[in-house]
Image (cartoon, grey):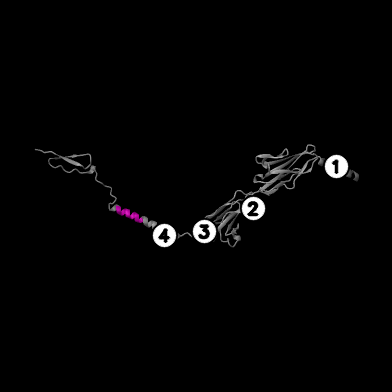
Amino acid sequence: MAKTRLACLLTLLSTHCYFSVLAVVLKTSNEAPWTDEFDRIELSCLIESISTSNPRIEWKKITNEGPSYVYFDKKISGDLENRAMIREPATLLITNATRSDTAKYRCEVTAADDQRSFDEIVIDLVVRVKPVMPKCSVPKSVPFGKSAELSCVEEEGFPKSQYQWFKNKEEVPDDHKTSLKFFNSSYTLDADSGTLQFIAVRKEDAGEYFCRAKNDAGYAECPPQQMEVYDIDVLGILMGVLVVVIVLMSITAGICCAYKRGYFSTQKQTGNNYKVPAKGDGVDYVRTEDEGDFRHKSSFVI
């Protein structure tokens, strides 16, 4: 009985070994490699078993537009031309990675003489890009008790940047209650969008502010900008309004007085309301074209 079991086990092992030898099998040492921009990176494609002496090896870059060749017919092509090489037997070495190289890559090996003649592996490459100097917006002056928004934007870094704000070279915490220096401040900080929103500014919120954009590749900062907080002069505003009201009342009173005294009378003598003097004996008056202009002609009655 024992001999029968041993014979079966040996048969299974020999069969497994036989099919393993006749099958192409791939593996990789890293399915999700990453590198910084302009550095080199290796996409590992190792042939674990194969019988065919001269297999066909291809590499394809997979994007939203579909797959495209980067290694075909023993030549580097496409985006990686002049920037990559094949390291035997099938590993792809990128010597100068750029942000556009971030994608999935597929290593395909075809072995015509093997029982299982095809295998593939997919490698997800990320090329990290250091952020550039962010664009920061800080209001120069804000009235006490009013709201204020500070913004920070950076769009070159990959992965997407996270943001930090600093006041007088000290980091502004996400929660103001965790710091004694910011405990009395009222604000919200969004590390994803880079927005620092003050709900009601206080005198203590005045200072120099700058923003830092950071990711796994590094960070960049914008120059410091000063924000001042000033008091609103309520008494001055009321006095100004009162002066304006007094001036308007004085002008109105002056106009009314002038009307009463007839300075704005519009009645004028015209030719239509001109009263013709009574005729004297023996004199005829003739009216000319000009209103109010009369000349007489003599007429004697004998």
Can you say which quadrant of the picture contains the C terminus?
top left
Horizontal and vertical percent position of residue 10? 87, 43
Residues 297 and 235: in front is 297
Residue 258 is marked as none
Q: Which residue is mark 3?
A: 228
Q: Secondary structure at mark 2?
A: strand
Inter-mark Cα distance, 4 to 1: 104 Å
Magenta-tinted stretch: 249-258
Residue 218 is marked as 2
Which of the two labelled residues, at mark 4 and mark 1, occupies the earlier sequence position?
Answer: 1
Which of the two labelled residues, at mark 1 and mark 3, occupies the earlier sequence position?
Answer: 1
Q: Which amino acid, mark 3? A: Glu
Say whether residue 251 is magenta.
Answer: yes
Crowd rating for badge 3 (residues with CA inside 10 Å; few <14, some 14–19, many 20+): some
Q: Is residue 7 above or below residue 243?
A: above
Q: Which residue is mark 4?
A: 239
